[in-house]
Each structure stands twice: as structure tokens, then as C-alpha cells.
Amino acid sequence: MSSIKDRAPAWMKDIANVTTRGWAMATAADRPLPDYLIIGCKRGGTTSMFNYLVRHPGVMHMYPEIRGTKSTDYFFKGSGRSERWYRSHFPSERHRRSLQRNLGYRPLSGEASPYYVWDPRIAGKVRDVAPEVKSILLLREPVRRAWSHYQERVQNKVEPLSFADALDAEDARLEGEVERMLADPSYYSPAHDFYSYRSRGDYAPQIRNWLEHFPREQLLIVYAEDLYRNTESTFSEVCDFLEIPRIAMPTKKSFNSTWRTSDLPPETETNRLAAVYEPLRAEVEELVGKSAPW
């Protein structure tokens, strides 16, 4: 299916997209809100977790499946759009019921965006739209996470600075951005998204913010290292949380990681970041309820 999509000319894709989106909007009232969200962290395995889940027979792709969509970005880039527009990206109730007859249990749908946990406004927005949703948060060793985030920005040609200079510039780049975001619910800050290399590794405030809006039983926190070292058992934990049957892993491949050049930054920056994160570790472990594997 994806190969057909890849071979199709641009004009055909445009027509198909308009037609599909029009149908999805027309039937949005029959499209339930997501059952789960994967909310982060950036460069922490969000894409891999999403791809593992949609290979489970009881987890449906976003609509339409052929597009391979992972996220709508609705809660930070789509704030001006309607809930109807948001619903249009998920499978219909009719499709769910049909699949449920074959499975013997209700299938799920969801989306994934690593920005959801990082934007301080989003937990409240999600609660207002989908208060019953379950959220999955992956946490990665923060020095490696920061370096991976930086490498991605360089790869995407939006980061002209060296890693050391980017860390030096981070406070100035982010100055006032959260205040602008809180003052304007529709404001999207590329700087807050792109250049938050060090800041995003301070996990405790992000977790606490989410828990101000959702009960702890609706949030599963997984260490990314556990996902990759103990993929089968960690995926089973996720299945239990979502209340779907455990299955043998359909794949253990890592997604969205082929461009990496190395896992750790130069020694000077590694030591610099480690000194920042080490005092923060105990609070993260207390919130997670489990020792960090880093």
C-alpha cells in the first residue's frame, strides 16, 4: 500500500488527500477521540513505540492508514481547528465495531507527538477534549537525548551552531517564549520546540504538569532504555496499561534513528550536561516509581 503511495504522481496524491479528508470531515461525528497518546519525550522512542503499537492487531492506524500519519499536532499547531477536524483523523466507530467482532475486544486508536509533554499548555487542552485518554511517556538518558535532539536539528538544517554554542545560546533563544505561549493559546514557538536541548532533559516539571491534569493511573512512564533492552517485556507492560492482549512483538526494529552519527556528544559537553542532570535524577525516579537505568 505504501509503495503505491510512493509511486503515485503528486497530482494524484493531492486529489486523494482532498477526497479522503473531505470524507473524514463529513463522518467526523462517527469517529471517536483517541484512546491513547504517546506524549514524549523528544528523541526518546516515541516513533518506535507508535510503530510497535500500530502493529498490534488491536490498535488501529490513524485515518487514512495509507498516509502513515503519527500525529495531528492538534494540541499545539491545530488550536485554531475544530474538534471535528481532530476526530476526522481517527477510525470510524463503524470500522471499530467491525474489527471488534473479529477480535473479541474493542480496538484502540491514538497518536504520538513528543512535543505534547513539553508544551506546558497541552495537558490542560488534552484534558478538556479527551479526559479519559491514557498517556504514555518515554524518558531517555538526558545527555544522549540532548545530543540526539541536536543532531536531528542539524540534519534538518535548522541548527547552524556547534553543540557547545547551542547550549550557550539556549537560554537566550528560549527567553520569553513560555510566557508568550501561556499568553496566547494559539502561539507556536519554533525556538521552544527546536532549541530546547538541555531544558527538555529536566523531566520532573513536565511529569508534574501532566499529573496536575490527569490522575497517575492514566499515565504510564517508560524508560526508553528499557524499551530497547527489554523490548518484549516493556511492550507487554504497555499492552497491560492499555488493556489489550499481550502479543509476541511483531518487530523490534528501532524507528527514526538512521541518521545518527554517535550516541554521546564530545566529552566536554557530556560532562557539562551530566552535572546539570545528576541532581535532578532522584525526583524523576520518585515520580516514575522506578530507578532510572542510566
Image (cartoon, rainbow, N blue to C red):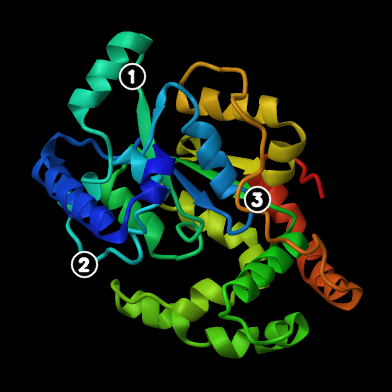
Front residue (pair 182, 283): 182
Q: Position of residue 43 (x, y in %)?
A: 63, 57
Q: Is residue 64 above or below residue 276?
A: above
Q: Position of residue 47 (x, y in %)?
A: 55, 48
Residue pointed to by mark 1: 106
Task: Categorize mark 3 by other alpha carbons within 10 Å: few (<14), some (14-19), many (20+).
Answer: many
Residue pointed to by mark 3: 139
Q: Residue at x 45, y 57 (%)?
A: 116
Q: Please say if the residues under marks 3 and 1 sit with CB atoms less than 8 Å apart.
A: no
Q: Residue at x 85, y 70 (%)?
A: 270
Q: Residue 51 vs residue 29: left or right?
A: right
Give the foreground label among 3 and 1. Answer: 1
Front residue (pair 59, 173): 59
Q: SS class of the residue under badge 2?
A: loop
Q: SS class of the residue under badge 1?
A: loop
Distance from disc 1 to disc 2, alpha carbons, whole Å, reads 31 Å
Q: SS class of the residue under badge 3?
A: strand
Distance from disc 2 to disc 3, alpha carbons, whole Å, reads 30 Å
The tag on residue 80 is: 2
Q: Residue 201 vs residue 64: left or right?
A: right
Task: Categorize mark 1 by other alpha carbons within 10 Å: few (<14), some (14-19), many (20+).
Answer: some
